[in-house]
Image: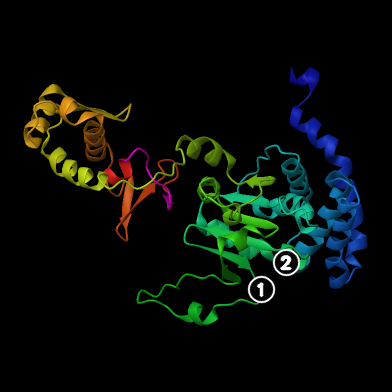
């Protein structure tokens, strides 16, 4: 089939080759521009977009401008393969790049191009760059922010523990020089000025994690006044490690629930009862299906401890739910393997990567049961 129809990837790359050649052709002319003239390119692009030109019309020139800016700020030059990757992302498809091929730098091409409308006044057209953890969001904001800032775009960063705006004038060298007792540097937020979430979301380009973007969307749908919306636009997103975020992590839903006055007491009650039950006698565990099922003997034992004759008739499904979740927490979830406890908070460990998923919670009360 390949010998007859050819390779689909090769056909695609052949199709974008004219755009790559035009970008390379523009490089020599941009070399002669001063920093001020190169920065003014963004104003020219904004006027052309406002005048009716499409993003595809200005793609070669914007890519060439980003490449030249990267050379002047980061001392890095986009390779032709990275230009192809930028076009792929701009067109809304997936670009597979091996480790070390410069995915972070590649993303700047499509991010800058698609942020031009927002910079031109179309406030709903913010660009989101989705990373897998808070550290990468901060790192990429401070690193790639040099390119966007040079070209006159604003860059925000949304973390679970705070929000920031890229500001080259903001430094924390006094904090960076301080070492803790073990000799390690303290947390560095160099060039990241603390800001409110609403201010960060108002930037042309916003870095953050999938969970933070997701929960902020849910919170915006719970507000009573539209003036309280913090993340108004969803126009263009670049997803890093797309397989992890859209397949592995997508299996865990994002749920916001309201507090319940009675539930904490019930979790405490069943957390003391369940450890008194015996596996294979009072309950059975299926590790493959990740289930723990209480037996009739186990249910009778629980009813006796609670002083009930029939838990279903006297307390209903509410008590049974808390019992089942406490049993799952006891039998299936183990500290320092499935989760860790940090600052009195349960933090989930990603079973695929081993990363700590700060801000993520188990659903249906399992987190409280643990």
Residue 164: name its quadrant: bottom right
| Colour mapping used in the image | rainbow
Q: Main secondary structure of the magenta part?
A: loop
Residue 305 percent across, percent down from the top left: 7, 36
The span from disc 1 to disc 2 (Cα, nearest Å) is 8 Å
Question: In this picture, which residue range is highlighted in magenta?
Answer: 355-365
Image quarter hosting the N terminus: top right
* Label 2 crowd (10 A; few <14 / some 14-19 / many >=20): some
Which residue: 50% across, 77% down? 176
At x 90% / y 68%, what residue is drawn?
A: 33
User: Residue 225 at what x, y percent from top left?
Assistant: 57, 52
Which residue is found at the position 76% from the left and 67% from the top?
150
Is residue 343 visible to the viewer in this orientation of the structure? yes
Local secondary structure at mark 2? helix
The correct choice, above or below, for 216 with respect to 33 in the image is above
Residue 180 picture quarter: bottom left
Depth check: give the residue in front, 136 or 214: 214
Q: Position of residue 255 (x, y in %)?
A: 44, 41
Say whether residue 59 is left or right of residue 356: right
* Sequence-earlier tag: 1 or 2: 2
Q: Residue at x 25, y 47 (%)?
A: 264
Secondary structure, mark 1, is: loop
Viewer-nearest residue: 14 or 174: 174
Circle number at residue 149: 2
For residue 168, the mark is 1
Q: Which numbered circle lies on residue 253? A: none
């Amino acid at each position: 089939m390949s010998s007859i129809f050819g390779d689909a990837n090769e056909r695609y790359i052949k199709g974008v080759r004219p755009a790559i050649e035009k970008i390379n052709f523009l490089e020599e002319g941009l070399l002669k521009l001063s920093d001020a003239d190169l920065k003014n390119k963004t104003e020219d692009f904004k006027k052309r977009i406002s005048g009716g030109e499409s993003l595809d019309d200005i793609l070669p020139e914007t890519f060439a401008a980003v490449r030249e800016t990267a050379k002047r700020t980061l001392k890095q030059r986009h390779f032709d393969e990275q230009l192809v990757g930028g076009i792929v992302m701009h067109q809304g498809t997936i670009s597979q790049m091996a480790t070390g091929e410069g995915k972070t730098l590649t993303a700047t091409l499509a991010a800058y191009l698609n942020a031009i409308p927002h910079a031109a006044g179309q406030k709903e057209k913010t660009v989101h760059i989705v990373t897998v953890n808070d550290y990468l969001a901060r790192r990429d904001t401070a690193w790639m922010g040099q390119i966007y800032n040079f070209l006159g775009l604003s860059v925000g960063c949304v973390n679970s523990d705070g929000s920031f705006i890229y500001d080259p004038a903001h430094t924390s060298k006094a904090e960076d020089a301080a070492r803790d007792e073990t000799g390690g540097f303290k947390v560095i937020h160099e060039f990241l000025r603390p800001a409110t979430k609403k201010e960060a979301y108002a930037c042309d380009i916003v870095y953050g994690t999938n969970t933070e973007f997701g929960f902020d969307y849910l919170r915006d749908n719970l507000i009573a006044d539209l003036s309280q919306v913090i993340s108004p636009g969803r126009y263009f997103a670049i997803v890093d490690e797309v397989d992890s975020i859209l397949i592995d992590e997508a299996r865990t839903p994002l749920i916001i629930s309201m507090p319940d006055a009675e539930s904490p007491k019930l979790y405490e009650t069943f957390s003391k009862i369940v450890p008194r039950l015996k596996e294979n006698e009072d309950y059975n565990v299926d590790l493959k299906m990740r289930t723990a099922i209480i037996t009739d003997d186990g249910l009778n034992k629980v009813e006796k401890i609670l002083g009930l004759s029939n838990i279903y008739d006297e307390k209903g499904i509410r008590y049974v739910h808390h019992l089942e979740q406490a049993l799952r927490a006891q039998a299936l979830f183990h500290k320092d393997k499935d989760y860790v406890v940090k600052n009195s908070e349960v933090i989930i460990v990603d079973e695929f990567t081993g990363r700590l998923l700060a801000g993520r919670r188990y659903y249906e009360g399992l987190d409280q049961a643990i």
